[in-house]
Amino acid sequence: MNTRKNLYNLVLLGVLAGLIFLMGQTPIGLIPLGFCNVTLLVIPVAVGTIYMGWKHGLVLGAAFAATSLVSALTKPSALVATLMGASPILAIVMTVLPRLCIPLVIWGVYQLLSRKQKHAAAAVAAACGSLTNTVLYLGLMLLFYILCGIDNTKVLTTIAAVAGGAGPLEALAAAIIVPPILTALWKIKKV
């Protein structure tokens, strides 16, 4: 039974990681707005983290980070390109670190809330994971712009725009989409 569960989790991990790469390289997962990208890549990370645990979630967070890094290197937004020109190392840290924190926040929030209502806990955890990505990514971008001495007016404008629109919408989408997917996976698990 344990071998079957491990194989099932490995296959699901592969499917979710593949979905992250597919979504990350198409408009499905990274919707470009010019000044920033609206990302839905947190959704497979949240599903995998809640369903399989934080260790598998970290693998999915790393897949998200790798996908983001490829985008930052091949088709960066204007803000990322500016930071990349000033300090490629800081741009890489800004791209990778928030994505590795997402599953840890999702797992922690889900563990705190799941004793009472696991579907509501999944929605809140997914939203918190999405907000973690937004806050850490833009927060690090602002910090690194300041450290590199780059004019941060555009970053502050982006932060205001994301805080008022894209960030909450990403969190809402994650909160709405993740619980039904998990419900289906939990039903399959019982069969």
Image (cartoon, helix red, strand yellow):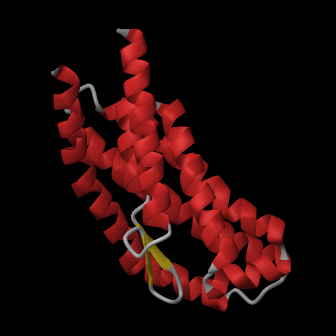
Residue 172, placed above or below residue 105: below
Image quarter hosting the C terminus: top left
On the image, the x and y values in percent for residue 80 come to 67, 79
Q: Is residue 2 left or right of residue 115?
A: right
Residue 11, placed above or below residue 7: below
Q: Residue at x 49, y 82 (%)?
A: 160
Of 35 and 139, the residue lying toward us: 35
Q: Residue at x 79, y 86 (%)?
A: 150
On the image, the x and y values in percent for residue 37 come to 48, 77
Q: Residue at x 71, y 83 (%)?
A: 81
Residue 153, placed above or below residue 67: below
Image quarter hosting the N terminus: top left
On the image, the x and y values in percent for residue 79 come to 65, 84
Of 5 and 59, the residue lying toward us: 5
Q: Is residue 41 left or right of residue 155?
A: left
Q: Is residue 73 left or right of residue 169?
A: right
